[in-house]
Amino acid sequence: MSQLDFSIAFGHFFIFIFFIYVFFHILITFFYKYNYNLKLRNVRESYDLDIQKSDEEIKTVKRILNL
């Protein structure tokens, strides 16, 4: 095999490695973002529930004070 064949083979090999890196980078980034958004959504829902509970407590206290 000539020098040109080796350089073509190494070039294809490095391009293949580069595409594998890009694929896994996109995959990991997607799952990280999805997991982060899922956790953020859970935090927002729990925060909304806390606000609803505190609103109910405030209404109860106002009702008691108005008696």
Image (spheres, grey):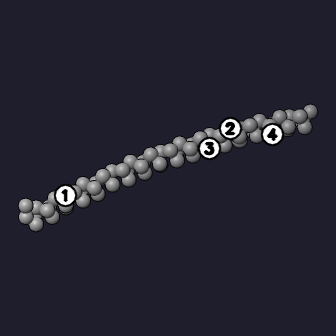
Question: From mark 3 to mark 2, how far is it between C-alphas?
Answer: 10 Å
In the image: residue 57, left or right of residue 28 = right
Residue for point 36% across, 50% down: 24
Label 4 vs label 1, nearer the camera: 1
Q: Which residue is mark 2?
A: 49
Q: Which residue is mark 1?
A: 12
**N-term mark: 4 or 3:** 3
Label 4 vs label 2, nearer the camera: 2
Label 3, secondary structure: give it.
Answer: helix
Q: Quadrant of the C terminus?
A: top right
Label 2, secondary structure: give it.
Answer: helix
Of all residues, the one furthest to the front in this rendering is 1
Residue 41 in the image: state x and y as whole percent: 57, 43
Question: From mark 4 to mark 3, how far is it between C-alphas?
Answer: 22 Å
- In this picture, is 13 found above or below 50? below
Residue 43 circle label: 3
Residue 58 circle label: 4
**N-term mark: 4 or 2:** 2
